[in-house]
């Protein structure tokens, strides 16, 4: 499956070392002022090769519009966007064409399809997320006009970080999108430490959706929290997702966990802005846990496609941490989900339907 979403949906294509990667987006309302500069800015946030905390693969990720825009506005038809790969080094992978990289999708792709693109993982590479970030940027163009804000940043690198006092404005300026000024340097030091050890580290990203209207989410099988979790778990390297209090709720009593309501609204937000799969008007809070980058430059035991045990010595250019650039992808996917839910919700009340067609 290469498609995500219902009313607002996208389909990605391309491989890490192929000619290009891109996305076809459907459900974009006609007449939207299309901000190509904003789109490129969002692409640049995800772009590799910007600093020492990311892979050295230096792709400019300049996005091109193939269809769906006329005189600066969306036409309501499919919006096709593409980024041409320019800095791939496929020869770096020639020594592993018959070897499965531990913790990568090599083993499962080969056993499922009987063939795999060993050049950077092919379709399973995180380079595919270019299309997701582009779709998220388009979704944001719509959400921004409705004052719905989707923000993200890094709470933890390894075990270094905090569970509260997030500063999203600081994250915009941070090279690693850190949400905590007091921990940023320690987090940077940790990334460089594992990088110098030819190793990698995990991390935790936070995504907040502010000013979401009440009523988003489609019970029973398209609940807002369920689809947000699906969107996050579909990102390369994500191993767990929490909404609101998340796993902490399992250790609370009902009195502790329940968000009481007074004349001013909800007193707390353990629900993470979602009740019964439907948004309640509070900030939607998502915590996304990323595993360490599986591509490390230490010798590892593995198996080849012939079932023989062997040793792997990896080459190439790889992120020492997935979570940093992954946080941008998580933010994009949350934006897609919210716009999709907004469009799905438009006809849920008879009064709204009459208002639209009257």
Image (tube, helix red, strand yellow):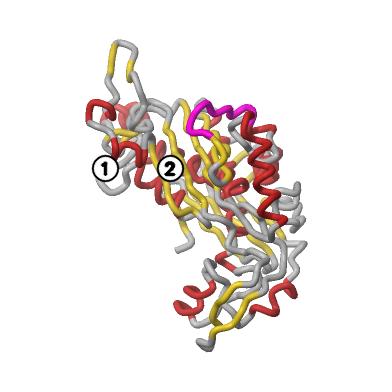
Instruction: Please tell me which residue lies in front, 351 or 290.
Output: 290
Whole-percent x, y for residue 293 in the image: 59, 58
Residue at 47% in and 28% down: 210
Say if 137 sits above or below 57 in the image: above
The secondary element bearing badge 2 is classed as helix
In space, the residues marked 1 and 2 are separated at their CA atoms by 14 Å
Dividing the picture into quadrants, the one containing residue 177 is top right
When the figure is inspected, residue 54 is found, relative to residue 29, above or below; the finding is below
Q: Identify the residue position indicated by label 1 in the image.
A: 219
**Residue 248 badge:** none
Other-residue count near label 1 (Cα within 10 Å), few / some / many at <14 / 14–19 / ≥20: few
Q: Say if the magenta span includes residue 122.
A: no
User: Is residue 358 shown to the viewer in this render?
Assistant: no
Q: Which of 113/36 is in front? A: 113
Where residue 225 sits, quadrant-wise, is top left
Where is residue 141, by image quadrant? top right
Which one is nearer the viewer's eye here, 75 or 43? 43
How many residues crowd around disc 2 within 10 Å: few (fewer than 14), some, or many (20 or more)? many
* Secondary structure category for the residue under label 1: loop
Percent from the top left, x then y, of residue 266?
33, 20
Q: What residue would you read off at disc 2?
A: 340
Residue numbers of the magenta segment: 162-170
Q: Residue furthest top?
A: 263
Residue 61 image position (x, y, % from top left): 72, 52
Give the residue drawn at x 31%, y 36%.
Answer: 249
- Give the residue drawn at x 62%, y 34%: 183
User: Looking at the image, is mark 1 or mark 2 earlier in the sequence?
Assistant: 1
Q: Is residue 166 magenta?
A: yes
Magenta span dominant secondary structure: loop
Q: Provide residue 79's location: percent of width, then percent of height.
A: 58, 50
């Amino acid at each position: 499956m290469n498609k995500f979403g219902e009313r607002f949906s996208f389909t990605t294509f391309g491989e890490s070392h192929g000619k290009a990667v891109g996305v076809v987006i459907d459900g974009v309302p006609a007449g939207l002022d299309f901000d190509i500069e904003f789109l490129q800015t969002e692409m640049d946030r995800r772009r590799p090769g910007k600093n020492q905390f990311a892979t050295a693969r230096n792709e400019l990720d300049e996005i091109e519009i193939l269809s769906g825009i006329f005189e600066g506005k969306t036409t309501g038809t499919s919006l096709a966007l593409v980024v041409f790969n320019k800095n791939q080094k496929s020869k770096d992978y020639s020594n592993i064409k018959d070897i499965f990289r531990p913790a990568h999708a090599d083993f499962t792709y080969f056993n499922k399809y009987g063939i795999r693109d060993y050049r950077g993982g092919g379709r399973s590479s995180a380079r595919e997320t270019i299309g997701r970030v582009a779709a998220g940027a388009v979704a944001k163009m719509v959400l921004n006009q409705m004052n719905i804000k989707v923000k993200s940043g890094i709470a933890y690198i390894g075990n270094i970080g905090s569970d509260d006092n997030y500063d999203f404005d600081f994250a915009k300026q941070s090279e690693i999108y850190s949400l905590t000024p007091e921990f940023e340097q320690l987090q940077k030091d940790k990334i460089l430490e594992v990088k110098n050890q030819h190793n990698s580290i995990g991390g935790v990203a936070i995504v907040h959706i502010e000013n979401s209207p009440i009523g988003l989410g489609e019970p029973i099988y398209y609940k807002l929290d369920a689809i947000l979790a699906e969107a996050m778990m579909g990102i390369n390297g994500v191993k767990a997702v929490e909404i609101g209090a998340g796993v902490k709720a399992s250790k609370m009593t009902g009195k502790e966990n329940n968000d009481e309501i007074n004349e001013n609204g909800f007193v707390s937000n353990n629900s993470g802005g979602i009740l019964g799969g439907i948004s309640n008007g509070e900030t939607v809070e998502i915590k996304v846990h990323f595993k360490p980058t599986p591509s490390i430059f230490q010798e590892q035991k593995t198996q080849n496609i012939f079932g023989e045990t062997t040793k792997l010595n990896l080459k190439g250019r790889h992120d020492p941490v997935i979570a940093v650039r992954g946080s941008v992808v998580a933010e994009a996917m949350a934006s897609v989900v919210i716009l999709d839910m907004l469009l799905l919700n438009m006809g849920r009340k008879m009064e709204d339907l009459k208002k639209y067609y009257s």
